[in-house]
Image: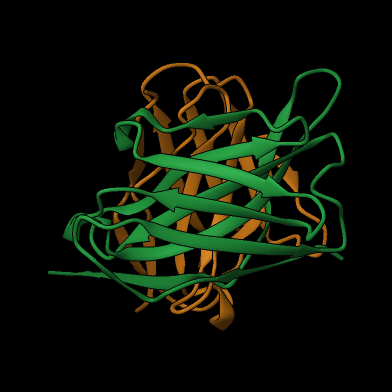
Amino acid sequence: DIQLTQSPSSLSASVGDRVTISCRASQSTSNFLHWYQQKPGEAPKLLIYAASSLQSGVPSRFSGGGSRTDFTLTISSLQPEDFATYYCQQSYSTPWTFGQGTKVEIK
Amino acid sequence: QVQLQESGPGLVKASQTLSLTCTVSGVSISSSGYYWSWIRQHPVKGLEWIGYIYYSGSTYYNPSLKSRAAISGDTSKNQFSLKLSSVTAADTAVYFCAISSYDNSGYRGGFDDWGQGTLVIVSS
């Protein structure tokens, strides 16, 4: 199985901050790497697919980068509605797997 | 617009079979180009992909479930279902159904749409 390790596990940030979350894969996932946002009591929401493509309707302050084993999700200017947990996920090989999540909290 | 809705018992006794159904609207589950998945979220362990079915009826399961999972589709109702046998407390989780797509080049996308999730508690 491909293990996805996110860092940090949690972070505190202020509105307006630039935030970067890392996802490292135990082996190459090519660009079959996606990012989700999840708020309490809700299903995850797809933000970024194919490592760097913005899902329709997602604000442009979200961006993704990286390839093979190292990926990042960046929020250029954190907004109040962005406080949530973020997950990466790979669809390169089965079983598809998720990272353990990064909780973004208000500083 | 694709919508998915999970349904099923919220309480299952240990050793019995968990059964959930996902009702889909906005796209036919018999259309090519889509995977129909079940995913669960444990309070502590995070998100775990259970398996998928696609338009041909083929399925794939996460080996971690040790052959306890079975996913089937009902095209007449545009639904797909999950059965998880011999459940234990470790199967207590929120269960989601979700759709992802693939294209002719073999690219497999992320989970574009999800149901709202349903909590299943396994009781002793």
- Going 46% across and 79% down the picture, which residue do you hit? A41
Chain identifier matching the green colour in the rendered picture: B
The tint of chain A in the picture is: orange
- Going 53% across and 50% down the picture, which residue do you hit? B38
Res. A18 in view: no
Colouring scheme, one of rainbow, by chain, secondary structure, one colour: by chain
* Left-right relation of A104 to B6: left
- On screen, residue B96 above or below B9: above
Q: Quadrant of the N terminus of chain B?
A: bottom right
Is B107 or B13 nearer to us in this picture?
B13
- Going 78% across and 57% down the picture, which residue do you hit? B78
Q: Position of residue B24 (x, y in %)?
A: 75, 62
Residue lying at the far left of the rendered structure: B124
- Going 49% across and 33% down the picture, which residue do you hit? A96
* Left-right relation of A16 to B119: right
* Left-right relation of A49 to A41: right
Q: How many marks?
A: 0
Q: Quadrant of the C terminus of chain B?
A: bottom left
Q: Position of residue A86 (x, y in %)?
A: 47, 58
Q: Position of residue B112 (x, y in %)?
A: 71, 53
Is A40 or B52 nearer to us in this picture?
B52
Is B123 or A93 nearer to us in this picture?
B123
Q: Position of residue A71 (x, y in %)?
A: 51, 34
* Left-right relation of B42 to B90: right
